[in-house]
Image: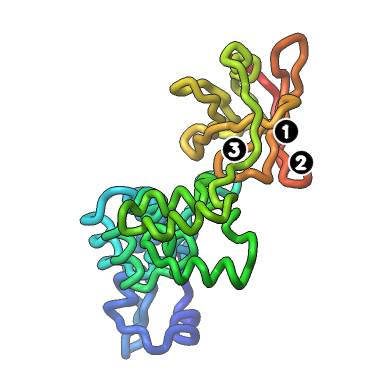
Amino acid sequence: MLHQVSRRDVLVALPGMSLLTAALHGIPIRSAWGSEEKASSNLWPEFPRQDPKMVKEIVGVAHFDEKRVRELIDAHPALVNAWWDWGYGDWESPLGAASHVGRRAIAEFLIERGARMDIFAAAMLGHTDIVKGFVAARPGIQRSYGPHNITLLAHAQAGGSEASETFAYLESLGDAGQLPKTVELAPNERETFVGHYTFGPAEQDRLEVKIEKERLMIARPGITNQRLNYVGENQFFPAGAPFVRIRFDVREGKAAALTVIDKDPLVEATRVAG
């Protein structure tokens, strides 16, 4: 998609931009003789927000691929503080990704490049004094969740032996590994909710509830795919979003509709297949 920018916009907003930079960004440029040249544009539709494809990639690879993380940050330094929403508000940064899987080298590289240190990274890296400082300043913060509802204690555990002191301290608090409350859903009850639910006329205006590896999942095909956690009375929350509720209208043993609720209803979808 081409993005049209007027010459006046360039001259007023970006007076110091070089012709080469303008050309690389597909911005119309005026020569000293008043003529205009147009460079091809490959900007993404959300510009000047960061390219969502790159954001998703940097967060994804920060879980396991140090080489690719370095390549992406070298090419696009601002990605170091990018955040990706896996769905329903389950936000994750590259540092957050590296922290909950114990990728110390990736985390330290990101911090060196300007990533914002938080209590979860500090716990994984074994910075006990920093973690204690957070808890002293804000008692109860140890019960906060990282991406995907991963606990602070689990982050320290991911840090291995180098975070053993931090782990011991957090364990002594008694509630740093406390997960959101859920209710067990019997395997034979999962089928009650499986199906396709539509909330609009377009092909992508649908949600799919399915079973993967004995887990109930909810997906917007091609966009999100998250585990559902049961809280009782035909209600669930998606992984990483414990304050969101997905409520099913069950009739004669089968869900007929669902509603996504973030305090107020966001989406109401009717079951059409499955």
The residue at 31%/84% (across/down) is 18
The N terminus: image quadrant: bottom left
Label 3 Cα crowd, 10 Å radius (few <14 / some 14-19 / many 20+): many
- The local secondary structure at tag 2 comes to strand
Percent x, y for residue 245?
Answer: 70, 38
| Residue position marked by numbered label 3 in the rendering | 238
Give the mark, 2 or 1, whose residue is nearer the N terminus.
Answer: 1
In the image, which is nearer the foreground, mark 2 or mark 3? Answer: 3
Which kind of residue does numbered mark 3 sit on? Pro
Image quarter for residue 37? bottom left
Residue 122: tell me if it is visible. yes
Tell me the residue at 40%/69% (across/down): 115
Regarding mark 1 in the picture, which secondary structure is present there?
A: strand
Please report the residue visible at 46 percent of the width from the left and 23 percent of the height from the top.
212
Q: Where, by quadrant of the figure, is residue 179 drawn? A: top right
**How many numbered marks have been drawn onto this rendered protein structure?**
3
Give the Cα distance between marks 2 and 3.
15 Å
- Point 60% across, 19% down: residue: 195
Extreme residue in the left direction: 67
Q: How is the image coloured?
A: rainbow
- Percent coordinates x, y for residue 221 in the rendering: 50, 32
- Say which residue label 2 marks: 265
**Which one is nearer the viewer's eye here, 64 or 171?**
171
Residue type for callout 2? Pro
> Sequence order check: which comes first, mark 1 or mark 3?
3
Residue 259 - label = 1
Is residue 182 positioned above or below 96 on the image?
above
Residue 137 located left or right of residue 94: right
Q: Amino acid at mark 1?
A: Thr
- Residue nearest the observer in this picture, 229 or 73: 229
Mark 2 and mark 1: Cα distance apart in space? 7 Å
